[in-house]
Amino acid sequence: MKAIQITEIGGPGVLKYVDVDDPKPSSGQALIEIKAIGVNFIDVYMRTGLYPARLPMVPGMEAAGVVLEVGEDVSEISKGDTVAFASTVGSYAEKIVVPAWTLVKVPDGLDLGIAAAVMLQGMTAHYLSRDTYSLRAGDVCLVHAAAGGVGLLLTQMAKNIGATVIGTVSTEEKAILAKEAGVDYIINYVQQDFEAEVKQFTDGSGVDVVYDAVGVTTFDKSLACLKARGYMILYGQSSGPVPPVPPTALAGRSLFLTRPTLASYSATKEEIDYRAGEVLHWLNTGDLNLHIHDRYKLEDAKIAHEHLEGRLTTGKLLLMP
């Protein structure tokens, strides 16, 4: 089968389109014919070595497709089911073997591209807004990269709860998308000081929670935007990792700081079914809208990574085998 393989860490050029052996399912596993693959920043982190990975490797952690075969002791799904998954490495390929308990059935009528595009980022937005900090009606949150894949979904979930959303973007095009998703107050952080704007919008009180996937370039000012006992949620680092933070940096206003991961919030089948089930249901009913920026051929993974890292995209990128 065809796959994208990495044999060394580096830039997008290390993504090679090659032939690899077809995988075979073992006990508790399912073989999936992949129809659509989600592209995420964690794929970049693995490619560059920011997140250590064993080489050679097939990157990617999210896809949707059709079950071709199941191993022994599999009762959750059957051959022919349309399914989606997140958090299993190796999705940049035509086929993949996945632990059956991590698979979620795709609702009838929902496009597999949409299902692939929403699993990782949709479940991330879900746990961020429901559990890491449980948003309530009347809360004010700051969402960085509000026109990104997670940002657009997180904004919609926050608005459906009744929260007020302040969103940062880098271009006017992204500002339009963020506004369409429901952002109440847009800040172009290239042209404006987002800390000063947040303070002005909140009459100096600050926000209840900051959702920050940008990292080093936004972290310090994000902390300054929080009200007393506010939550600083650092769930990504697209601009680079944040240096060590002394506990005293949180002391002045008794702030909370956490660095959550999807793996910790989808550790059981029950939790995966709960999160993915709600997200896929909302998509199917129109309560959640997904913006797909572009679909690339699998062999063009290098181009997709260049566009993602260059911040030339809004919403979600897909690879199509």
Image (cartoon, rainbow, N blue to C red):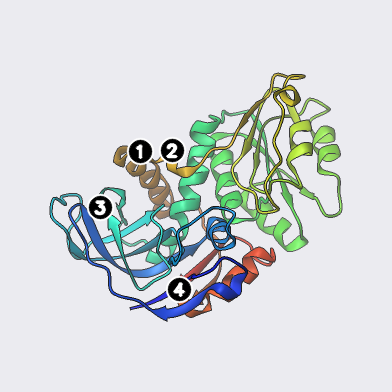
Place of residue 125 in the rendered image (x, y in percent of width and height, measured from the top left): 52, 44
Mark 4 vs 3: CB contact within 8 A:
no
Q: Is residue 44 above or below residue 150?
A: below
Mark 4 vs 2: CB contact within 8 A:
no
Mark sitting earlier along the chain (2/3): 3
* Neighbourhood count class around disc 1 (C-alpha, 10 Å): few under 14, some 14–19, many 20 upward: few
Q: Quadrant of residue 265?
A: top left
Alpha-carbon span between mark 3 and mark 1:
14 Å
Rendered image: mark on residue 100: 3
Tag 2 secondary structure: helix
Look at mark 4 in the image and give the residue it sits on.
4
* Nearer the camera: disc 1 or disc 4: 4
Mark 1 vs 2: CB contact within 8 A:
yes
Tag 4 secondary structure: strand
* Neighbourhood count class around disc 4 (C-alpha, 10 Å): few under 14, some 14–19, many 20 upward: many
Place of residue 245 in the rendered image (x, y in percent of width and height, measured from the top left): 71, 32
Place of residue 61 in the rendered image (x, y in percent of width and height, measured from the top left): 44, 58
Mark 2 vs 3: CB contact within 8 A:
no
